[in-house]
Image (spheres, rainbow, N blue to C red):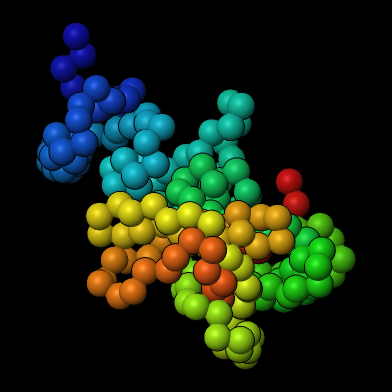
Amino acid sequence: IVTKPRVLLLDEPLGALDKALRVDMQIELKRIQREIGITTIFVTHDQEEALTMSDRIGILRDGQLVQEGPPEEIYDSPKSEFAATFLGDANIFRGEATGVGIRLPDGTAIAARAGATLAAGAKASCAVRPERIRIAIDSGSADQANGNVLRGQVSKRIFAGNNSTYFVERDGQTLKVIVQNTGADRLAEGQEVLLRWSPKSTVLIAAN
C-alpha cells in the first residue's frame, strides 16, 4: 500500500451511489483533495460530475486527447463538435463559413462571437448551448438586429422541476432549449416560436 502517493487515480469512484449521496461525496472528496494537496486524476463519464470535481478536464476520444483545459473554458469554448456535445448539450448548426459566422443551407446567417473566424466558404459548424437560447411565441417579427433568430415549432416539452426542455423542429433539425420554470405561461406542443440568442453564445467550429 502506498502511503504517500504523488498522484491518485480515482476511476468512477461514485458510480454506484444515488444522486443525493453522490453530490455530498463530490463536495467531501474535493475538500479532502484540497486539504491533502495530492494531484488527483478523476475518471468519469458523468458530465456534471466532471464539471463539478475538476480544476482541469481532459476529453478523450478513441484514446486521443481532444481538448484539455479549465471546465469553464471547455464548456464555453469547445474546439470540436465532439467536445461540445460530450460535455453538456449543444445545438449544432452546419453550413459554410462567412467570416463572421456561418450560412446554413437554406441561406440563414448565424453570427458567432467576435474573433472566431474561418475562411469564407469553408465547411464549418456552430455550437450553441440550450440554456443560452431564449424562446417565445412567434409574433411575426424576426428582426436579427440584436442577435441570431430562428423560427420553429415546439414538438415536445420535458418538465424537470426547476427547468423545462423544449424540443423545437426547424427545417428538419430538432433543437433543444432549456428554460427556468418561473411560473410563466408554458408553450404548447405545435406552437410556432422564435428562438433568439447572442452571437457571444455561438461558438464557431471548423468542420470535423
Residue at 45% across, 49% down? 88
Residue at 59% across, 82% down? 147
- In this view, 25 is above or below 9: below
* Image position of 87 (left or right of 109): left
Q: Quadrant of residue 124?
A: bottom right
Residue at 30% across, 33% down? 40
* Image position of 106 (left or right of 23): right
Residue 128 locus on image (x, y percent): 55, 62
- In this view, 44 is above or below 140: above
Q: Nearer the viewer, residue 32 or 25?
A: 25
* Image position of 97 (left or right of 77): right
Q: Quadrant of residue 114?
A: bottom right
Residue 80 locus on image (x, y percent): 63, 49
Residue 20 locus on image (x, y percent): 15, 38
Q: Nearer the viewer, residue 156 or 58?
A: 156
Q: Quadrant of residue 54?
A: top left
Residue at 81% across, 68% down? 106
- In this view, 77 is above or below 52: below
Is residue 196 something one can see in this rendering? no
Residue 60 locus on image (x, y percent): 54, 33
